[in-house]
Image: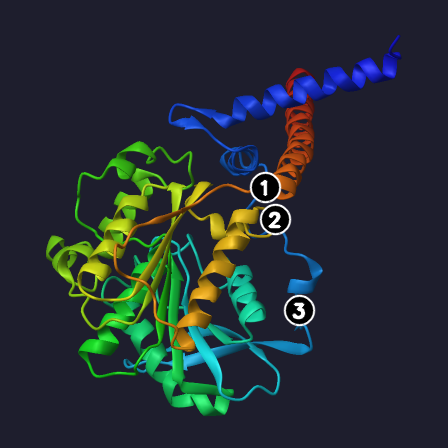
Amino acid sequence: MFSLSFKIMIGFCIILSSFVSGWSTTSEGTLPSKTAVVLHAINNQLVVPNEQLTPPAFLTGNSSSGNVTFEQKSLEIPVSDGSLIPARMHRPIGVEDAPIILYYHGGAFMEGYGSIHTHDNIVRALAYRSNAIVISVGYRLAPEHIFPKAVDDSYDALLWAHEQAEELGGSKEKIIVAGDSAGGNIATVTAMQARNKGGPELQAQLLFYPLTTFHDRSLETRNKYDSGHYLLSRKVMEKARDTYTPGEEMRKNPYVSPLDEGVAEDLPPAFIATAEYDPLRDEGELYAHKLNDEDVPVEAIRYEGVMHGFLSFYEVMATGSHAIDDSLDFLDRTLNDEPLQTAGFRIVERGQPSGVERIREETEAHLAAVYLLGLHAERRFNDWVETTLLADSAKDN
């Protein structure tokens, strides 16, 4: 006969699994447990991204990768209108002739949605896993600074990095642009500007779930995953469009809508990552096809089971870590002149974690669910206490 404590434990596990199952069930399909738990935590404001999802100790402060020690340094980059924009650099100490990655953060082109601070974990990971110098560029944001200020700042930052490359310990011949979401847009647009203006020759562009058009196109994933449950809502997309490009004519500029208005020919090789549950998935993959059609080497991977912004959660979501590694593997092959296979181009679908990794993800998801349920209970208790105290105070008065 089972003991009472064992029966209680079994009952708790069943209840816990029912919660996770409920969070996983959506009108668009069943989410993996880890994705569902992360989304539940964020959508219910139980955790704040980049604040409570803290990185491991080996990715904080001055760290090392193998025998390489890194430093973090705040910079101010001069731009063409005489202003200075902030930047943050991670680089191996004592490095010479290293690749330089210019990283443009996501965040809908608007103040309050993203910065060099919110995306610092991605920048650290790129630097420490590649032994490259990675500079996160704090381009100016709407509503105070509308298009083309962000793209002008970003191109000026590229020119500055090229100019300062040797002093930084980097190579002028190994410069890469990278970015996620809005930053993915800016990264590929910066590559277009470099080509059009005879600027630095770039070796690659790493684009993570990029926004590629401001036109109101009827795309399946824009409509299917635009509720906001998957971190990016139609409301935010429309706000970004109206704030960053308040004039409709702006949206016809190739430096705003590279998918529909831009010419891809002679752009550097591209790595494009898209997410299964992302309103930007279709336009990112259409851009991959556009690059391929115009003879730009491109590798495109759709990561299954994850949502927009998943790279920011790479410390707790294995798929985010895989995407970083895949992009750097692409970069390594590109820098070493290994030819990319473009014949019969297709979007590669990278499946969800399996085997031991899948077991670990499921275990971590359920442990995280325990923590979240505790936060739920704490919040309700605090609300009850506050309500009770207010009621008692009202009686006393």
- The percent position of residue 205, horizontal first and vertical second, equals 35, 68
Give whichever of 364, 149 is nearer the camera: 364
Query: What amino acid is at disc 3?
Result: Gly
- The percent position of residue 376, horizontal first and vertical second, equals 64, 28
User: For mark 3, what is the residue?
Assistant: 61
Give the residue furthest to the bottom.
167
Instruction: Tell me whether circle 2 and circle 1 mark residues in contact (CB < 8 Å).
Output: yes
Give whichever of 126, 301 is nearer the camera: 301
The disc at residue 125 is: none
Is tag 1's residue or tag 3's residue first in the polypeptide sequence? 1
Query: What amino acid is at disc 2?
Result: Leu
Left or right of residue 21, residue 223 in this image: left
User: For mark 1, what is the residue?
Assistant: 47
Quadrant of the rendered structure where residue 190 is? bottom left
Q: Secondary structure at mark 3?
A: loop
Q: CA distance from mark 2 to mark 1?
A: 7 Å
Is tag 2's residue or tag 1's residue first in the polypeptide sequence? 1
User: For mark 2, what is the residue?
Assistant: 53
- The percent position of residue 303, horizontal first and vertical second, equals 43, 46
